[in-house]
Image (cartoon, rainbow, N blue to C red):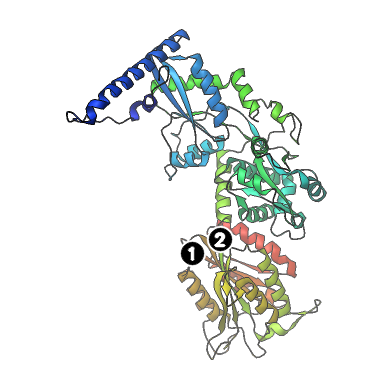
Amino acid sequence: MGGRHRTDELDDDYNSHRAPTRRRRGGPGRLLAPLVGSVALAVLLGVAAFAIVSRDRGCSGDRVALRVTASPDIQPAVSRIAQGFNKAGHRVGDGCAVVTVTKGVSATVASGLAGSGGRVGAMDAWIPDSSLWVTGLRAKNPQVPAPGPSTAHSPIVMVAAGSVIPSLRKNLGEASWVGMISAANVANVDGPGRKVRVLALDPSLNAAGLGALLAASGVANASGIGQEELVGALKALSGSTARDQDALLASLGVKGTRAPVGIASEQAVWAFNSARRPKVPAVPLYPAEGTLNLDYPMVITTRNTAARGAAEAFQKELGTEAARKILRAEGFRTPDGQGGTAVAGTGGFQAEAPKTLETPDAATVARLSQSWSRLNLGTRLVTLLDVSGTMALPVPGTGLTRMQAITKIAVEGMRLFPVKSEIGFWEFSTHLDRQGLDYRETVPVGPLTENLDGVLRRDLINQRLATIRAKATGDTGLNDTLAAAYRQMTEEYQSDKINTVLILTDGAGNDDPDGGIGDLEILKTLRESYNPEKPVSILIIAFGPDAPKGKRQMDALAKATGGEAYIAKDVLEVRRFFLQGMKRRICAPHC
């Protein structure tokens, strides 16, 4: 064991001390005594060897342990740099700095430092993959140490398997954030998304995913793309996220009807190709507008004076040319954008660093992170479809009845909801189910993919929409129906979803000659029932010549619950209403 370091020396003040236990005479204890003595002698020789070697290199004294936690992608390179640093011997105060580097997923470490559940081991310094994590922490707690200089850079790029590059260029043109937004927009059903499948990284777990979100949002604002289009893209991406970069890159090789394109750091693409050696390598695509970088800052977290001195010395070491050579060999760029042979212009990599976009401020990062969280909530919705007699009337100039037009709107809307949504379907008209009951719960609220007597809920709703007919003698009976639906959705409220009552009508009003709940009474009921802490909103879509006449009352019903009323001029306008509804998720319940 001569010349090796003691493993417990790195525990510093964290090692436990136990009182010696008594040993009975005779037996195994006597046989072990010589062995214990030999081990103790070997340990002492090891310590002596460490002191002699360090002294020969200009450093003598006790160890000053520096425990560094680094993002898993850069940890191997930082470990190699630490080995050279330790071998050279660096004096810190009265001791010698000794650096150990362990892996730590940046999102987990950030969560631990924020006190929100992530597990963080003992560390004196942290090298996350992005300063965005530190920005988020400091926005909530200014006492969190500020990040130091960048250790390395890796641009955030789009990425695809080499075999689909021709298809992507045909459908998207050059790689760009604008093109990705267009392909991902859930409401742009006739756009490039028919041929291209966009994969995302969850920005709450991946800095590359958050950086891509920030870059795309900034470009969208600068280029005049409406927020609705961006929201439509983000909503679609929220349902197709990969857990990490390696999983996303591996999925690029899965064959499908659409060409997959995703997000990753440039270094992750290089590492994936180097480690996995896929038959069809992943190819980085550099966005034409520019991009953001993972910047790997060093954050000194220890308050111990000696450990801080060691951290500052190691931080300087990370900026030396010897260290940068190691980083470039592992697919990283130095902070000035220079790359090594790993990114020297082959396999789609470009030697010149891409244009760097301006890093957003902390408020923008927080706002977009919150927007993503809101859009990522599930959907729980009950649709109330007007089947009263007026729905059988024709819509001038369309060749359709009001019922046919409204059901087309409903079918088009169903296409926009993710498969994980929970949706139900009611019909309403006076005395529809029996005398005095103005509604029928045709399909109860539940997951679209749930099997109901051999039929998926989504298919069951579409089947009913295809065959539904207006009740020729029926009046509207809206208010009684709305009161019952709102009460049920409130009682069954789910906090991890956006809870909504959607009304599809011709806008003719309540029209209930047999009494029931009046217009003023339903408004009073809704206002008293609405809870901003557990919001259930009402959305109304009306179509037909009578819709403008009822707009005032429809607006009042929706506003009582923080909702919105829309009048559709054509069937495809429901796509715009869907995007506006998604936008409302971001501001609800204070829109």
Disc 2 crowd, CA 10 A, few/some/many (<14, 14-19, 20+): some
Q: Quadrant location of the N terminus?
A: top left
- Provide the residue designation for mark 2: 378
Q: How far apart are marks 2 and 1 (CA)?
A: 9 Å
As drawn, 452 above or below 495 = below
Q: Find numbered disc 2 in the image and state the secondary structure of the residue it sits on.
A: strand
Q: Position of residue 386 (x, y in %)?
A: 63, 79
Camera-nearest residue between 286 and 559? 286
- Residue 434 is at least partly visible in this image: yes
Amino acid type, residue under disc 1 in the picture: Gln
In the rendering, at what x and y percent does residue 113 appear? Answer: 44, 38
Relative to residue 170, is residue 346 depicted above or below?
Answer: above
Badge 1 local density, few (<14 within 10 Å), some, or many (20+)?
A: some
Q: Is residue 320 left or right of residue 463?
A: left
Furthest residue toward left: 25
Residue 224 is at least partly visible in this image = no
Q: Which residue is disc 1 drawn over?
A: 494
| Residue at image point 30% right, 23% down | 35
Q: What residue type is labelled 2?
A: Gly
Q: Which mark is residue 264?
A: none
Q: Which residue is drawn at 47% across and 42% down?
A: 111
**Does dot 1 land on a helix, a strand or a loop?**
loop
State the residue in front, 312 or 42: 42
Q: Are marks 2 and 1 in contact (CB under 8 Å)?
A: yes
**Quadrant location, the C terminus:** bottom right
> Horizontal placement of 41 versus 113: left or right?
left
Q: Where's residue 116, x and y in %?
A: 43, 45
Asked whether, in this view, residue 582 is left or right of residue 68, the answer is: right
Q: How many marks are shown on the rendered structure?
A: 2
Residue 330 rendering spot, x and y as whole percentages: 63, 29
| Residue 32 sits in quarter | top left
Query: Which circle's residue, 2 or 1, is located before the other in the chain?
Result: 2
